[in-house]
Image (cartoon, grey):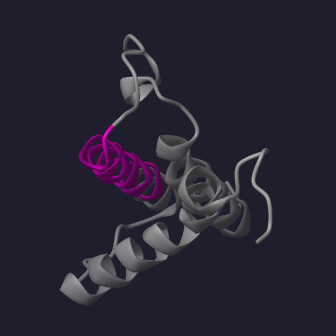
């Protein structure tokens, strides 16, 4: 696999995974819908999706060649990037105005 394709695949996976917790009220997209999900549940889903994205990236890196050891800085920056990629879903879920909102 071409390394540039692998990079784009990981970025696409990260964008979809970072926004996924905000798009459904079902726990982990498969559980029963029981009202609104709490913020803590969404944070748990976000952590699980970040782990899934890291696993996909590691697998692609191993397939391309040798995996490089990373320090804590890499994981801190990756987590910050992942949370930033989830911002559109957060805005859509919590900050958008309701359909019946009136200025004033």
Q: Residue at x 79, y 59 (%)?
A: 102
Q: Is residue 21 above or below residue 30?
A: below
Residue situated in front as seen by the camera: 24 or 96: 96
Q: Residue furthest front?
A: 104
Q: Residue furthest top?
A: 32
Q: Is residue 37 above or below residue 5?
A: above
Q: Residue at x 54, y 56 (%)?
A: 94
Q: Position of residue 77 (x, y in %)?
A: 37, 84
Q: Is residue 43 above or below residue 74?
A: above
Q: Is residue 30 above or below residue 66?
A: above
Q: Position of residue 71 (x, y in %)?
A: 21, 85
74 sits left or right of 18 in the view = left
Residue situated in front as seen by the camera: 98 or 69: 98
Q: Which residues are magenta?
A: 38-57
Quadrant occupied by the N terminus = bottom right
83 sits left or right of 79 in the view = right
34 sits left or right of 84 in the view = left
């Amino acid at each position: 696999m071409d390394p540039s394709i692998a990079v784009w695949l990981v970025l696409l996976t990260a964008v979809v995974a970072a926004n996924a917790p905000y798009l459904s009220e079902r726990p982990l997209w498969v559980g029963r819908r029981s009202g609104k999900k709490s913020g803590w549940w969404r944070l748990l889903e976000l952590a699980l999706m970040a782990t899934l994205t890291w696993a996909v990236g590691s697998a692609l890196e191993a397939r391309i060649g040798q995996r490089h050891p990373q320090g804590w800085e890499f994981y801190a920056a990756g987590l910050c990037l992942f949370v930033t990629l989830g911002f559109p879903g957060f805005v859509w879920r919590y900050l958008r105005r309701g359909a019946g909102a009136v200025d004033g």
